[in-house]
Image (cartoon, rainbow, N blue to C red):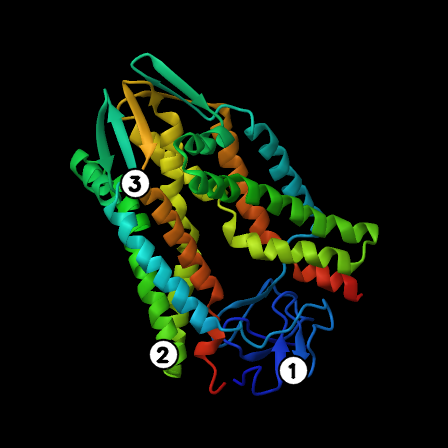
Amino acid sequence: MLTSACSECGGVVSIDSTKDFTHHHCPRCGALLYHQTFSDNFIIMMALTTLLLFIPLLFLPVLNVNFLGFSTTTTLPKALWGLVNDQEYIVAIVSIITGLLVPFLMIIMILATLIAPKFGIKRAMILPIYRVYESCKEWGMAEVYLVAILVSMIKLSEKSILEVGLGLYLFALFALMFYITNTYYNPDKIWESYEK
Amino acid sequence: MRSDVELGLILCKHCNLLNSNQLHRCRRCNSILEQRIPHSMLKTALYLFASLIFLIPANLLPIMVVYELGVAKPSTIIGGFIHFMQSGSYSVAIIIFVASVLVPILKICVVAYALMVARFRLRDRAMGALKMFRVVRAVGKWSMLDVFVVAFMVSMVQFEIVSSIVAGPAALAFLLAVIAMMLATKSFDTRLMFDKTT
């Protein structure tokens, strides 16, 4: 038996850690207290896949817009950088950070926290990485950016001819993989692996 | 059910280990222990107020200005919703309305309600407030949708004199409102609603 407290309502609960369960919820407020997921190796593989999808995204065209003979093609970073020409520096920088930089760093940090214990790296080294991951969790908005592109496409399709690039398909896959990897990443396991 | 405060325990928010409240650092991960988020209610209230203030210019000023053959057509958030309703794209209109008008208003109401529950110790309302708060927290980042749409449209529509789009002042105001709101939900400690005394 493991005694823990709910992080959302503060109630002290006991978790039967010997039982084979996947999810353990707080009996009072229903908050998720503990979840057992795939093995570390599986999550490392998913994170690597996500990372591999990310790199070509920086260079591949996402969308080509043709309007009365004028045409523009863009990649993901270029699309957000467009605001800099309008002197909207804050909006541009925040968009790039939340839409691309934070998702990328989050995947790197997941990989680092999972791979480092395998090489016997001390817990004190991994903790700062995990804390940074924790604090930027809400600011990774790859999926929001993806839906924003789809909304923009509907707006643009009224007047111009659109040609979807390979980048958009890859970005959809990336956003999906990014979401799955973050959902199944379970830091509790890292702490457990050090307790043995 | 008894709370961690009553039993003299502190939960480490980084590694979820229960520590005795005699300790200042977690015995497993060495993080600094805090019973509750410090100044949680004050911080939440201030971020909430900031978000409310930013929402006014965000909705009233143009979020982007469309230039067609030199003629400027400013568009506001509510204007975009009306445009899609009139052109028959109801699904897009509903997405825009929910994401950029309804959600910010609902979020402010729910967080204000949760703050009241915590401040006036309305413990029998805590469960309901927590459930609504969770929804608000989950949809938080989707309010950034508009900012990304503006960013994307601005860089896609650059067809010299024929048609071009420039970001409006509401884009920055909207971004700041969303960020302030996210910080408000982040700094609110939901456990305060369930605590008997401090």
Q: Which residue is mark 3?
A: B63
Question: Depth check: A58 or B72 in front?
Answer: B72
Question: Depth check: B157 or A111 in front?
Answer: B157
- Which residue appears farthest toward the front when viewing the image? A87
Q: Which residue is mark 2?
A: B125
Residue A43 image point, x, y percent: 66, 47
Residue B53 lies in what quarter of the image? Answer: bottom left
| Amino acid on which the number 2 mark rests in the picture | Arg
Residue B9 image point, x, y percent: 63, 82
What is the chain letter for disc 3?
A: B
Residue A108 lies in what quarter of the image? Answer: top right
Residue located at (46% from left, 80% from top): B194
In terms of secondary structure, where does tag 1 sit? loop
- Is residue B128 visible to the viewer in this orientation of the structure? no
Residues at marks 3 and 1 touching, judged by CB atoms closer than 8 Å: no
- Gap in angstroms between the C-alphas marked 2 and 1: 28 Å
